[in-house]
Amino acid sequence: NDTLISAPLNVATHLNEYFLNVANETLAQAVYDGNPVTPDYRLQVNDSLILWPTSQKEVKTTIRTLKTKNSAGFDNISTRLLKTCSEPLLNPLTTIINNSFAEGIFPSKLKLAKVYPKLKKGDPTQITNYRPISLLPSISKIIEKIVLSRLLDFFKKHNLFPDNQHGFIEGKSTSTALVRIVEYLIRALDKGDTTTAIFLDFTKAFDCLSHDKLLKKLESRGITGQTADWFRSYLSGRTQSVEIKSTDQGKKKTTTSRPLPVNRGVPQGSVLGPILYIIFVSDFPDYLKRYCSMLMYADDTVLLLQNKQPSTLEINSYIAINMAIEYCQTNDLVLNQTKTQQLIMGRKKEDEVLELPEAQRVDNVKNLGVV
């Protein structure tokens, strides 16, 4: 409101409130026509994931896989310190993790995130020029890594990840995603088809995610009973505080805002967050498969369409992008239509294919670091 705030506690408090309100404000500003459809939570597998007990050996191996860093969450335990003192901690850590699995409860002390504001660029007095860097307790990452190994094994066993998704999945990468896109385009050109690639841009996708909808999607994929309770506990009751450093009369000091609840999104900086997002959107390709192919790398999503008749391609493109918008409305995601781009390729006259009003027509596009 054009008011300059300088008191450290006020600055930390306002930054914390801003970071936490971004998701709700993003959803509130999204303008959609019509009403959202009912999500499909049909059961995908007749099996249930069990979080079986861990062992000291597994805990020790997991600690070794942590990146060695000096930074720490509010527990002030860095991964460097944890690795140095791991031996005497193996027994109590194993007990804590096994109790967590048995009771279906994620430890509440590990749900507080320490957030540092990082200036992206521009005027440092403008709050919108900052993004949050979240630090979670190192012990939290040990538990999450062990859960992740069980979750990935279960999803691979039952083939629950869509083939279209190339993010954070073993054996896949940005390279495999780009190769698939190029292969699609070459096949279309060989057939003499005109193709269009629509590069969707989501606003704060990881932050806007609905916990209730994620839990229902997890349930439809075999996350039930005590395991479902664990994931519900993991997502709920989270808080975050912003920590800033300042100078007072030549002395450096640290100021921390009071904790505020985090009611949406996957925890930033977490181990499970990216995979939970991938699970959340794993039904997206099926939603549009009648009209287009889809390639995804986490939240980077490309719709691919081809046809010999530009008029048919135009109609299918309209349908595909509007169904993508409908999917976003149903799943509390926000499609940034001003940054969504359309690239048209083919041997036919490109101007025969009209532009989509929901996408920006471009001659080249940067996708996954490649133009």
Image: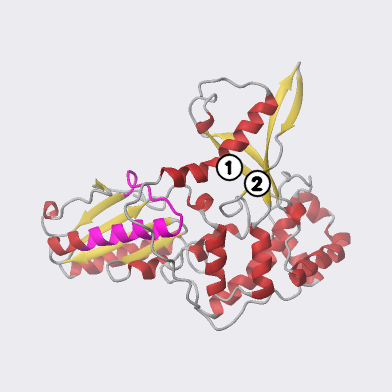
Q: Is residue 69 above or below residue 173?
A: above
**Residue 331 location, quadrant:** bottom left
Residue 293 seen in the figure: yes
Colour basis: secondary structure
Principal SS element in the magenta part?
A: helix
The kind of secondary structure element at disc 1 is: helix
Residue carrying label 2: 261
> Any mark on residue 20, and which?
1
Marks 2 and 1, Cα distance to the nearest angstrom?
8 Å
Q: Is residue 289 left or right of residue 188?
A: right
Name the foreground residue: 36 vs 74: 36
Percent across and percent down for residue 82 are 79, 54
Expressed as whole percent of the image width and height from the top left, the position of residue 190 reads 19, 69
* Residue 155 position within the rendered picture, expressed as x and y whole percent measured from the top left: 55, 74
On residue 231, which mark appears? none
Look at 63% across and 45% down and name the residue there.
Answer: 134
Q: Quadrant of residue 327?
A: bottom left
- Queried whether the magenta region covers residue 332, the answer comes back as yes
Stretch in magenta = 316-340
Asked if residue 28 is positioned above or below residue 277 in the image, the reply reads above
Label 1 sits on what residue type?
Leu
Residue type highlighted by circle 2? Pro
| Few, some or many residues within 10 Å of mark 1 (<14, 14–19, 20+) | many
Q: Residues within 10 Å of mark 2 (few under 14, many from 20)?
A: some
Question: Would you say the residues marked 2 and 1 are in contact, meaning their CB atoms lie under 8 Å apart?
Answer: yes
Foreground pick, 88 / 26 = 26
The foreground one among 368 and 339 is 339
The extreme bottom residue here reads 46
Circle nearer the N terminus (2, 1) = 1
Q: In the image, what residue occupies the spot 48% across and 52% down?
A: 205
